[in-house]
Every structure is written in structure tokens, then in C-alpha cells.
Image: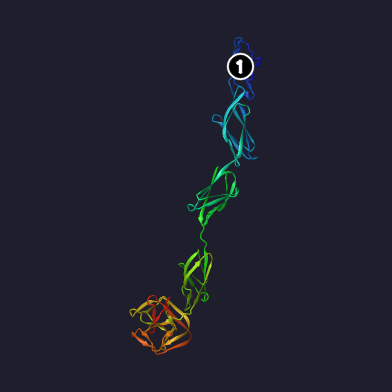
Amino acid sequence: MTYFYEKINENGSYRFMAHPGWNYTLQAVTPYGLTNGKSVTPYGEGGTELTLNTYQSRLGISVTEDGLPSGDQWSVTLGSNSNGYQTELSTSQTVLFNVSSVVDNDSYIFSYNYNAFAEGGFNFTSPAGVISATNLSPIVILKAVPATGSITFLESGLPAGDEWSIYFWVTGQTISTTSSGILFTNLPYLGYGYTVISPKGYTSTPQMSSVNLNSNSVTVNITFSKIPPTKYSITFEEKGLPSDTSWGVKFNGTLVSSTTPITFYAVNGTYPFSVPDTMSGKYTYVSSPSSGTILVNGSNQVLTISFNTNYNSCVNLTTPILMANGTYELAEYITAGDRIMTYNYSTGQLQPETVELAYHTPQKGQVAINHFLLIAPDQKVLTSRGYQEAMNLTIGERIYNIFTGHWTRINSLYSRQGTFTMVDFYVLVNHDYVAWFYVMEDKII
């Protein structure tokens, strides 16, 4: 052990007084520990120079954030490949690391990598780097600034070239485009409300919502779809039918039957309709109008259909009608689907046909021809002058008799007063039938 030493300069050089030939061991004392020791034996009066090797020690590295809101959590990872890494989480402003250093000439030499992360929508301006220093108390200050990112709105469903827009609530900014995307940039990490402005005739999903920006880039998908055209009601009401009578309307190709008003729905346009005649009991009710078109132009429509039995082309229900098999059946009992005999005016031949419709209707007044043929005043009969209404016939005029093939003279002709149940038929081809022996024109629809 030496008994005397003096400091030569501020760079860490010292002079020791020693006995020549003795062996000495020297070791430097530092605030953080001892350097490695060295042995030396001085000879002669000139002395011996000795350099002490550096020695690893521990020191603290202080990392301080600047700019985070009080209480926000942040973290720092510090280390090196040779010494490993450690991560510190903190809600305070400063994080202290105890790390290995190298002591050399009263300096602490170190080199460590760091990576810092701020939460709560902030970023550090220098989030990663290397801490290299030769001082005893290294301090690193990390500047925190609000994090920013971008929000991209991507649309689907629109035809190419259609314009759409996004309105940002916070900024009051509206961006429009005819392309598929809209980009908002340099936005702080926050939640943003927005409204989608759709082109005419389209709606979007979503129409109004919000999006949280919590990363560098967020994408919001907007789906557009066509708004269905507005449909308006077309209501058909009836008058003239007995209560609880089923009737029908064929609107634009769709037939609906009901005992109440009938309603259809359609967009703007012109549509055809038809109303079939309706049976109630033995009576057939004729519709008016029976067909037509209806215009829908931005409003609901109501159309009243009148039904009545006041048509006169018919024969008395007690009139015998010639059937297809050659027998006779009273007009009262013939219904749709029955086969009756008709007369082909062009060929002069009888032809069987199917009854499509049978009409029963009350009739005020009728005409009696030769006392037994009872028909409505405007029922047409085949005469030598062609088909003529009964009210226009005269005594002595001739009507065609299918059995004799001759023209029969009218010997008696008069009107009968009162209300009578009359019947008429509808057939597709010849549009006539045989009552008694005479040819009657059917009800042509």
C-alpha cells in the first residue's frame, strides 16, 4: 500500500511514491465502482508509467416525454443485442433505466437502441433511435405530438361517373367525387362523424355514422343501392252489385277478385285494365267501363265500376233453345259450358258451339212474335233483311226457319208490359243461337 500520491492533471493521471523493487497493485476507485486492478514493480528513479484498463459499471439513463396529456400511458424499449432489451410502461413523465456502461478516463461510454410508443392518439417525433453518450447522467427527451392519419371512403354500387359526397361534421368539409374513393388526410386520432350524400335515385348504407381513427389509415366502405320507384295505389270500387258479390279486375295482366274494393300498386305509367261481367244468382251484371287504361302520375287513383243488368238483347227464360245434340232445353237452365246449336250465316249450316257465358237479367217489357217467341225489344232476329231488332219488325215480314229452310211470315207482333226474366248467351264463332226455330244474335262482347 502506498502512503502518498498526487494528482497530476484533470484527465485522471496520478503519481504514486513507491520503493523501487517492490511489487504494487493499483486499482481506481469510481463513484460507480472499481476499475480492474494491475500489478507493477517500479525500478529506478525515473518511475514506471501504468495505464489502468476500463471496467464495466452501472448507470442510469433517464427518458422523459414532453407533450403527452397528464396520465397518458407511454412506453420505452431500451437495450442492445449484446445486453438484451427491457421495456418500461409509465404514466409519469420520466422513465429511468439502469444499464451497463464502460468506465474510461472518468467517462461512462454506452450505446443503446430505444423505441418509444405513445398511446391516446399521440406520436413521438423521434420514436426510435440510438442513445450514445460519454456523460454520467444521460437524459433523453422525447417530443410527443398528436398522431395523424387518413380516412378513405370507398363506394360500391354506383354507375361509373355518378357523383357522390362525404360531409365531415367536425371540419364542416364536404368532398365530392365521381370516382370510387374519397380521402381525408392529416387527421388527428379522434372519432369523426360523417354523412353520405347520395346521387338522385340512390340511397347509401350507412347514410350517417361515425368512424374512429386509431391507426395511420382507416377505410370505410359505402354501399349504394337504387331507391325503388314510388308506388301509388289504384283502387277499383264497384256499385250496383248485390252485397257480398264477388267481382274481379284484371290490372296490367293480373286478375284479382274480391267482394270489397280492389287495390293495386304501381309506379308512374299508363296501365290497361278490364272488368269481367259478374254473375249473382241467375243474373249477370255488366260492368261499365268494362275496360280501358288508367294513368298513374304521382298520386293515388280511384275508379268506380258500375254494374247493371239493364241490357235488352235476350229471350224469355221459358224459351226453348236448340242444343248441340238436337234436343231442346229451356233458356233458364242453360249455363256456361253447355253445348248449343248455332247457325253459320255464310254456309247456311248448323254448327255446335260451347256457351262461354249465360246472362240472366230482369227486363222491362218484351215483344211477342207469332204469340210464342218472346224476346227483348232490341234482340236481333235473322230476317230476310238480315239481323233486325224486334222493335223494328212488322207484320208480314219474314224470319228464317232453320228446319224448313224457308222464310216464315210474321203473322202476329205485339208488345207485352211488365218485368220479365230474360236470358242471353255468348258463343265465340257464329255469335248466334236457335230459339224455337229462329236464329237469334247473341250478346257480342
* Position in image of residue 310 (x %, y %): 48, 80
* Position in image of residue 264 (x %, y %): 50, 67
As drawn, the residue found furthest toward the top would be 44
* Position in image of residue 288 (x %, y %): 48, 75
- Within 10 Å of disc 1 (Cα), the crowding (few <14, some 14-19, many 20+) is few
Q: Quadrant of the N terminus?
A: top right
Tell which of 133 and 327 is nearer to you. 133
Q: Residue at x 45, y 85 (%)?
A: 366
* Position in image of residue 420 (x %, y %): 47, 84
Tell which of 325 and 432 is nearer to you. 432
What element does badge 1 sit on? strand
Q: Quadrant of the C terminus?
A: bottom left
**Residue 321 seen by the camera:** no
Horizontally, residue 283 falls left or right of residue 56, namely left
Q: How many marks?
A: 1
In this figure, which residue is indicated by the disc labeled 1? 25
Res 316 quadrant in image: bottom left
The colour scheme applied to this rendered structure is rainbow
Location of residue 187 with respect to 350 vertically, above or below = above
Location of residue 122 with respect to 441 vertically, above or below = above
Tell which of 27 and 177 is nearer to you. 177
Residue type pointed to by label 1: Thr
Tell which of 425 and 430 is nearer to you. 430
As drawn, the residue found furthest toward the bottom would be 411
Horizontally, residue 59 falls left or right of residue 308, namely right
**Residue 408 seen by the camera:** yes
